[in-house]
Image (cartoon, helix red, strand yellow):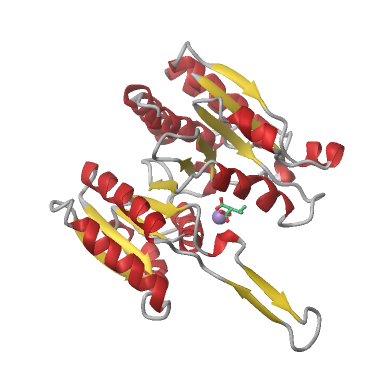
Amino acid sequence: MRLAVIPGDGIGPEVIDQALRVLRAVRSDVETTDYDFGARRYHRTGELLTEDDLASIREHDAILLGAIGDPSVPSGVLERGFLLKMRFALDHHVNLRPSKLFAGVTSPLAGDPDIDFVVVREGTEGPYTGNGGAIRVGTPHEVATEVSLNTRFGVERVVRDAFARAQQRRKKLTLVHKTNVLTFAGSLWSRTVDEVATEFPDVSTDYCHVDAATIYLVTDPGRFDVIVTDNLFGDIITDIAAAVSGGIGLAASGNIDATGTNPSMFEPVHGSAPDIAGQGKADPTAAILSVALLLRQLGDEDAATRIEKVVADDLAGRTDAASGTTETGDRIVAAL
Ligand code: IPM
Ligand code: MN
C-alpha cells in the first residue's frame, strides 16, 4: 500500500502517529511518503499545494491527513489553498461521514439514542466552487454573489453512491435539501433521487428539508440510515451529527473519488486544535477510525472491521485516566 501521509498542523502529527501505528498493526505492506503541507511550509515557502505536489500525491493508493490550520494564517487561506484544492483536484466527490454512537460514549442527547447513520456529502460542487463575485466592494452598495453549482453528472454520481451504501445497510436513503426555496438545484436533486431510485428498488427514499433535518438529528437521529446532501448542507449537518454521537474527537471521514482514478483522502473531521497541540491530550480515535474507512475503501474489509471492533471495545471501557493520545494508541494496537 503506497500511502501519502499529511500530518499537518496542531494535533495533526500526534493523532497521525497513532493512526499509522494502528495501520501497521493490521497491514505489513504499508509504504509511506510524508508531506509537510500546512502552516509551517506556507510560512517558509509561501506555497500550499503545487501542481508538482499533486502529481506526486497521485502516485499513491490513498492519503491520510491529520489536520491543517493555524491561527498564524488568515482564515480561508489554508482551507481554500490546501484542503478544498485537494478535494477538487483529486475529484473527491463523495465526502463520507459516518455517525455512530458507540457503547460507553455519552451523547449530549437525553436517553440512550440510537445513532448509526452515514452522511454522503457531495464534495466537489455546490457553493464551494468559488463561483461568484462582488461589485462596489466596501461601499454601501456592495453586492456579493456565491453561486451554488449543481450538475446532473455531479449530483447523479453522489446519489448513486449513496443508494449503493444504503443497499448495504438498512436500505433507507434520505435526501436533505431545501427544495422549497432552492427551486432549481432542489428540483435537480429530487428528480435525480427519484430516477436513480428505480435502480435500487429495495431501498426506500425519504426527503427532509435541511432545517427540519437539524431538528431530527437531535430529536430522532435513529430515523436516519444514509443521508445524501449537497456540499454546504452536508458540512453543517455533519458537525451536528458529530456532536450528538460523542463529539468531533470521534468523527472520521473520507474524501472519496469513487471512480478510483485518484487516491481518496481520509481525515478526522476535527481541526488542528492548536490550544491542545503538543500536549499528548488529543484523542486519536477519529484518525484511527479514518484508517478503518481507508482500508475499507481499498477493499480490506476485514482489517477495517477489526479496527472498528477494537475501537468500539476500547470506547466501551474507557476511563478519563486512560485518555492520553499515546495511551489510546497503545491500547488499540495491543488489542489488535
Ligand atoms: C470540513 C471543514 C471544511 C469544509 C473547511 C475547513 C473548508 O469544515 O471538512 O467540514 O467546509 O468542508
Ligand atoms: Mn465542516
Point out residue 250 in the picture as x, y percentages from the top left corner: 49, 42
- Quadrant for the C terminus, please: top left
Task: Please identify the quarter of the rendering in which residue 216 is found.
Answer: bottom left
Residue 264 lies, with reference to residue 274, above or below; the image says: above
What residue appears at the point 45 percent right and 31 percent down from the top-left corner? Answer: 294
Point out residue 4 in the picture as x, y percentages from the top left corner: 59, 27
Task: Please identify the quarter of the rendering in which residue 172 is found.
Answer: bottom left
Q: Is residue 326 left or right of residue 254?
A: right
- Residue 336 seen in this snapshot: yes
Q: Is residue 89 left or right of residue 26?
A: right
Residue most toward the right? 44
Q: Nearer the viewer, residue 335 or 274?
A: 274
Point out residue 211 in the picture as x, y percentages from the top left corner: 42, 73
Q: Is residue 291 left or right of residue 305?
A: right
Residue most toward the top? 28
Q: Nearer the viewer, residue 118 or 53?
A: 53
Q: Nearer the viewer, residue 114 or 147?
A: 147
What residue appears at the point 82 percent right and 49 percent down from the top-left corner? Answer: 72
- Residue 330 seen in this snapshot: no
Q: Is residue 262 left or right of residue 170?
A: right
Point out residue 92 in the picture as x, y percentages from the top left corner: 49, 44
Residue most toward the left? 201
Counting labels gives: 0
